[in-house]
Every structure is written in C-alpha cells, then in structure tokens.
Amino acid sequence: MSAATTPRTLPPRESTINLDASRRAQAAWSRVPVSRRLRIIRDARHRIAEQTAELAAAVKLPQRTSRAETLAAEILPLADACRFLEREAETLLAVRRLGRRGRPFWLGGSQVELHREPFGVVLIVAPSNYPLLLPGVQAAQALVAGNAVLWKPGHGGAEAAAELARLFCDAGLPENLLTVLDETPAAAQSAINAGVDKVLLTGSTESGRAVLGQLAASATPAVMELSGCEAVFVREDADLDLVARALRFGLTFNASFTCIAPRRVFVARRRHEELERRLVEELGSVAPMPVAQDSALELLRLARAALAGGARRVCGTLPEDRPWQDSRLAPLVLADVRPEMEILRADVAAPVLSLVAVDGDDQALELARRCRFELGATVFGEPRGARALAERVAAGVVVINDLIVPTADPRVPFGGRRASGFGITRGAEGLLELTQVKAMILRRGRFRPHFDPPDANQERLLSAFVQVAHGKSMYHRFQAVLEIARAVVSTRTRIAPPGRSER
C-alpha cells in the first residue's frame, strides 16, 4: 500500500461511536500483510520527522517549559518506537511452527502452528501528561497488529491526538482505522458500551478500577497502566552527585507529572545527611512549577500530616505558602519521614520527595514493599551491588544509575504490578499484548486410539504409554513397550507406529 499523495484530514474528535465502520475497516486491514502495514508506519515516521513543529505546537501542557521538552519527551521516542516496529514487528507477528522437540511420542504426526491475530477494535484511554507518546505508541502497535483503534484523549489532548491521526492518515492509513474521540469520560463509556474488543488505559488507579468495573459484564480484556509512587534506592556506595542531579531532573521533568517520577528515597543512613545537603544545593535555584489544584490540595494534606508526625521540610514549597490562584510549587523535599506515614504510599502528581534513612538493602526493600504501587524503581550504587539489589526490587521496570529516560527505549516493555496495574505496553511484549494466540494443530497418520470405545485394553495402553514416557529406568520403559505391543496385537488394531508419519 503506497502512501497517499493528497493529504487527508481526520476530524479532531468524534462525538458518536460508529463501531460498525471500525469493524468493517478492521476486517479488511487484518488481511493486509504486515509488511504493507509497516510501510504506512514508516511513512508516518518520516512525516513526524518533517512536521515536528506542528506536533509540538499541538501539545498544550501548562507544565511544559518549552517545545524542546515535548520533542525530547514525546516526539523523538515516538519516532523511535515506530522504527522499532518497522524492524521487529514482521518477525514477532509471524506464524511460529513448533518442531518435534518436546512433543509427546504418542502424538506422533501432530504439527502445531501458533498464529498471532488481532483483537478487532481497541479502545485507547489516554492520559493527560503525555498526550502524544503513550497513546501514540499504543495506537501504532495496535494498527501494526491488525486492529482498528478508538483513541479517547486525556484532558487537553484532543488537538495532539488529531494531529498525529492526521499524519497517519496522510501516510495512507485507510479510513475508520484510527478514530479520535472527544476527551470526556462519556466517550470512553460509549465505546465500551458499543462493544470494543480490548481496552488500554493509562491513568490513575481510581480510573482503572472504574473502567474495569464497566468491562466486567462483558469480560472485555484490558491493559491497565496505572499510578506509581517510584522508589529510589541509594546505596552506601552511590555517587551522590549523580543521585542529586537525577532527583532534580525527576522532580522537574514535565513538572514531576510523570508516573515514574521519584517520590520515595531510601538512602543508606550514613549518606542521608550528605544527600540532604546536595539536594538543597541542586534544588535551591529551581523555579516554582505549575501543579493542578487537586494535586496541590492532596500534597498539602499529605505534607501537613507528615510534618505533624515529625518529618522535616528540607526545601521547597508547601501549597499553603502561595495563593491558590498561583498553583505553582517549587520541589518539596521532606526528611525524617517514617514508614507509617501516608505520603510514602500515595500517588500524588506533584513535585515532592520523601527521604527515608535505612540500615541496608533488606530494610529498604521491606519498607518499599509496604506501598501498593509497583510501577517503576531506581537503584543508585556501584554496578554489581546495585544490580543485585535491582533483581530483588518489586516493580515493572528498574533503572540502575539513571532515572526515567532509559524507559523510553522502544525495546523496553512497560507495565506495573499490584495497584499499578497489569499488562504490558511498548516493546515486543507490548505489540504481542495486542494480539490473540490461535493454535492450529494438524494431525497426520492413522494413530487414533482415543477414538476407540473405552475398554480394559485401552487402560493397558494408556498405562504403558505413561511408563514409556516417564518410567524411571530403561528396564521399566522397555517392559512398557512390550506391553504396548501385546495390547496392539490382542485387539488386532492397525495402528501406524507413533512418530512414523510426519509428512
């Protein structure tokens, strides 16, 4: 399929759900070879590269300080994700044929193929903090897998969604395969009621629970990428200059409105005071950043409770320090935070960091596991020890000696555990998540003892088969072979020897 020569424009949003049109388009699209689908992805990637200014301008987030941040945070990794699909998708989606290895001998002649098939129509419920990257990658993967997509943008994300949909359409994507809905929760509800085949939601745990409740009646499958409360482990041998710079980045990147932004820092007790000092130096010049009022209110409640319980404010702004009309906060760092404090278990979308002194890795892990969010984590320290700790951390993705950015690698699968959700987006696993497995089994030969009516001789055969396959010694297995021969002769059944007929 060649790219369209005349640009086409999708409407910025749809107020009604035309699922029949999406299903018709998907039925035809599923028959298009993967290689031809990928030509459209490649053309769309080239258009993304040519129209970065238009894409960046379509992203209107109050926390973005410049279009350069949108280019780095969304457009570049989105283009990389498209190229990953171009390189890997055809192999990942190809029919896989199982060989003879591992096949039970009594199933001689069986040939097994595993097919990856699309779900049909996939609903993407997008977040507001990354309106291009997160739903854009999911949409590209869903389309490559052969699905049609309904895209419900997050608050303020309709323009960015429509702009990216236009690029895909201009690249030759057939009509009704990618439909941008309006931003309201009612749009997602309507799509679910219409009968979509799978839902991908990126958002809060509360939103995930609400959508799962709506999906339960129809048993519609879903991927839930939900809230995070990222744990950062600072071992005694960590480079504190690196740690302080990383935490500053994590608290300011996208105004800390990132699901894997740092929130809890478990630092070796001997390094705690020094890390405090370095954070004051790093964060002292950071200007206040815009924070949503509901997030500011939640932060105020949590911070007040922590301070009343004995925590200390190291630096930063409490919401009560500024008029509500401002809604801008400097990164807040709290020290002497105790394990029972709620702020260590909350998913607040605001620039706040809680420091917890620990006596070693075991205590750090035990305290970290008290939080129900297990989306991402970071470990700082000498590589060998940090790696050993990372292997014990409960999280969907663990970064060693860096923060956030390495997770944008298009090869990296992303997904949470416990209250942070389930299922995978991005990477090879994210592509396969958007397919269903169908096993096809071809049986050759005439060996079908299971078709015979049950009798004592069949019991002898089955017992002998178990002994041949799983007997503890060659003697036992040989005796079982003789028993099979006697059973076959006694019934005068013509049976093709297992494993002889393979063609």
Image (tube, rainbow, N blue to C red):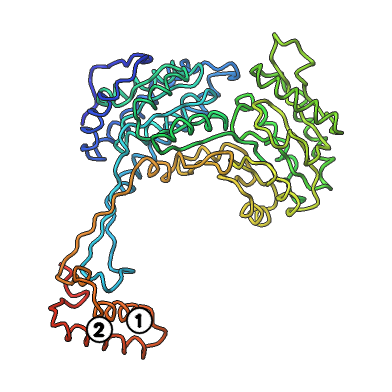
Can residue 53 be seen from the camera position used here? no
Please give left or right for residue 88 compared with residue 135 in the image: left
**What residue is pinned by disc 2?**
484
Q: Tell me which amino acid carries mark 1.
A: Gln
Split into 4 quadrants, where in the image is the C terminus?
Answer: bottom left
Q: Residue at 77% across / 44% down in the picture?
A: 267
Q: Which x, y percent locates residue 349?
A: 64, 26
Q: Marks 2 and 1, how far apart in space?
A: 10 Å
Q: Image height check: is 296 above or below 356?
A: above
Please give left or right for residue 458 compared with residue 160 in the image: left
Residue 215 sits in quarter: top left
Q: Image height check: is 430 above or below 279?
A: below
**What residue is pinned by disc 1?**
467
Q: Tell me which amino acid carries mark 2.
A: Ile
Dot 2 falls on a residue whose secondary structure is helix
Using the image, tell me which numbered label, if any, was put on residue 379. Answer: none
Residue farthest along the top direction in this orientation: 325
Dot 1 falls on a residue whose secondary structure is helix
Split into 4 quadrants, where in the image is the N terminus?
Answer: top left
Q: Residue at 15% across / 77% down in the picture?
A: 495
Sort mark 1 into few (<14), some (14-19) or many (20+) by Cα contacts within 10 Å.
Answer: some
Please give left or right for residue 187 compared with residue 93 in the image: right
Q: Earlier in the sequence, mark 2 or mark 1?
A: 1
Q: Which x, y percent locates residue 289?
A: 67, 19
Q: Residue at 16% across / 66% down in the picture?
A: 444
Between 126 and 492, which is closer to the camera in this rendering?
A: 492
Between 443 and 60, which is closer to the camera in this rendering?
A: 443
Residue 482 sits in quarter: bottom left
Q: Which x, y percent locates residue 163?
A: 39, 18
Please give left or right for residue 484 compared with residue 48 in the image: left
Between 219 and 299, which is closer to the camera in this rendering?
A: 219
